[in-house]
Each structure stands twice: as structure tokens, then as C-alpha cells.
Amino acid sequence: MDILSIAGVIVGVGAILLGIMLDGGDVNSLLNIPALIIVFGGTFGATFLQFPQATFVRSMKMFSWVLLPKEMDLSAQIDKVIFWSHLARKEGLLGLENAIPDEKDPFIKKGLQLLADGNDSAAIRDILDMDIDSKESMGLQAAGLYEAMGGYAPTIGILGAVMGLIHVMQNLTNPELLGQGIATAFVATIYGVGSANLFFLPVANKLKAHVLALTQAREMLVEGIISIAEGENPRNIKLKLGGYLYDSYKN
């Protein structure tokens, strides 16, 4: 569970609501159904038009990473690589086939299979790097969907504000309807700007960070697999891959 994500939502939204109450405002004044429909309906509609279905579905699935990010224990991955290295030295590269069924990650399975098949290091790197680039590109595209929503929401909010003001101008002779139009105008702007800066854009950036971290973890595995293919000493492999650890340079 990503505690910072939960804390971010609570602190961000809570600070705004608390500020309104301390200023003597009424929180209920922010509840406006027409403004809600205009801003979020328009934002999702524009997003549906921009992105293909596959990217939209992938981005919805990736949203869970905000609260439940993929676990990437780099130390454990390094230990695996060292184990494979010792296994390859003891039983030869073909012996790595016995380790393939124990792995759940398709990327690791592919790397071990390439090793067991006796491919040279250049071929292994080309194949795995292509896999990494493809996965990274798809992940960043999915994260970009939330970034796009963060761009559309404020603009749609302004559109909602203009529509509310038009409603006000049409009812200048009817004071009872003026309040509703003014409320929709201002609340729509709050919904647009608030959702973009408190939700859509932060979610996009957090997902991008997770995608890049996953890419780095896979790049580390590639270096380990290539080192095994080139017959490097397990101790040297461990020292090389240690550079990927976040705390490797701490005193």
C-alpha cells in the first residue's frame, strides 16, 4: 500500500475544505450536479476520442499501481541473478532450463530461455531491450491518458463557467435563477482546476515513475543475464548490479 498516495489525497482535498470552513464558507456549496456532469462528462468524452480502447483499458488497470505499486525488490532480483550464475557455472547454460518453471515474470522466463538456448550476448540484449522499450512505451502511453485528462479538465471547467454565465445573462430579470447559474459557473471551474491538479496530473506522474522504475529493474536483469552469457564471475556480477540499488552509495 502506497501511504503517500492516500496521504496526498487526504491532505490536498482536506486542506481546501478546511480553508473553506475556516473562511466561513459552506462546503455544501461545492456540490453542484450540473457542473459535475459538464466537467467530468466532457473530460472523459474528450479522452475517449483521443485514445484507442487498448490504451484506455490499460490505463484503467494501471491505476491500481497508485495505491498498490508493483513490488520490485532489487536485492532479491540480484540474488536470483547470482543463483543463476552459479547454476550456469555448475551445470552449464542448459541447466538454467530447470529454473524457468519457477519464475512467474514472462520477461524473466524469456531471458532465461534465451540463455538456455545458447544465444550470444548481443542477440539476447537486442531481444530483451526491444521488449523493455515496448513495455515502457505502452506504460507511458497509459500514464499519458491521465495527463491528458489533467489538461482537458480545466478547459472544460472554463467551458462550464461560460455556460453558467450565459444562463445568468438569460435570467437577469428572474433573480431566483441567478444563484444557480452563478454557482454552476464558479463550481465548474473549481472542479476542472481541482481535479486536474489534485488528481489527474499527480496520478499521471506517479504512474510514469512506476513505469520508469520497472524499466530500470528490467534493465538490471538484462545486465545480469548478459553477464552470465559472457561467463563473468558471480562476485563481479553482484558488484556490477549493486549499482542499481537505491542505497548502494549510503555511508
Image: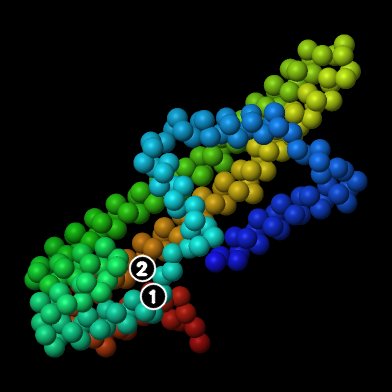
Task: Describe residue 141's horizontal placement relative to residue 163 as left or right.
Answer: left
Residue in the picture at 51% in, 44% down: 147
Q: Earlier in the sequence, mark 1 or mark 2?
A: 1
In the image, which disc is placed on residue 123? none
Task: Describe residue 116's horizontal placement relative to residue 145 as left or right.
Answer: left
Residue 170, by quadrant, is: top right
Residue farthest toward the front in the current orientation of the protein: 101
Total numbered labels placed on residues in the image? 2
Residue in the picture at 51% in, 39% down: 148
Q: Pinpoint residue 169: horizontal percent, then vertical percent.
A: 79, 15
Residue 82, by quadrant, is: bottom left
Distance between the Cα atoms at labels 1 and 2?
7 Å
- Identify the colour scheme used: rainbow
Q: Amino acid at mark 1?
A: Leu
Per the image, label 2 sits on a secondary structure element best described as helix
Q: Is residue 127 above or below residue 217?
A: above
Q: Pinpoint residue 226: horizontal percent, then vertical percent.
A: 20, 72
Q: Is residue 231 above or below residue 170?
A: below
Q: Which residue is mark 2?
A: 217
Q: Is residue 211 above or below residue 45?
A: below
Residue 155 in view here: no
Residue in the picture at 41% in, 70% down: 72
Per the image, label 1 sits on a secondary structure element best described as helix
Q: Is residue 229 above or below residue 196?
A: below
Q: Amino acid at mark 2?
A: Ala
Task: Describe residue 137's horizontal placement relative to residue 210 as left or right.
Answer: left
Q: Residues within 10 Å of mark 2 (few under 14, many from 20)?
A: some
> CB of mark 1 within 8 Å of CB of mark 2?
yes
Q: Residues within 10 Å of mark 1 (few under 14, many from 20)?
A: some
Q: Which residue is mark 1?
A: 74
Residue in the picture at 43% in, 69% down: 71
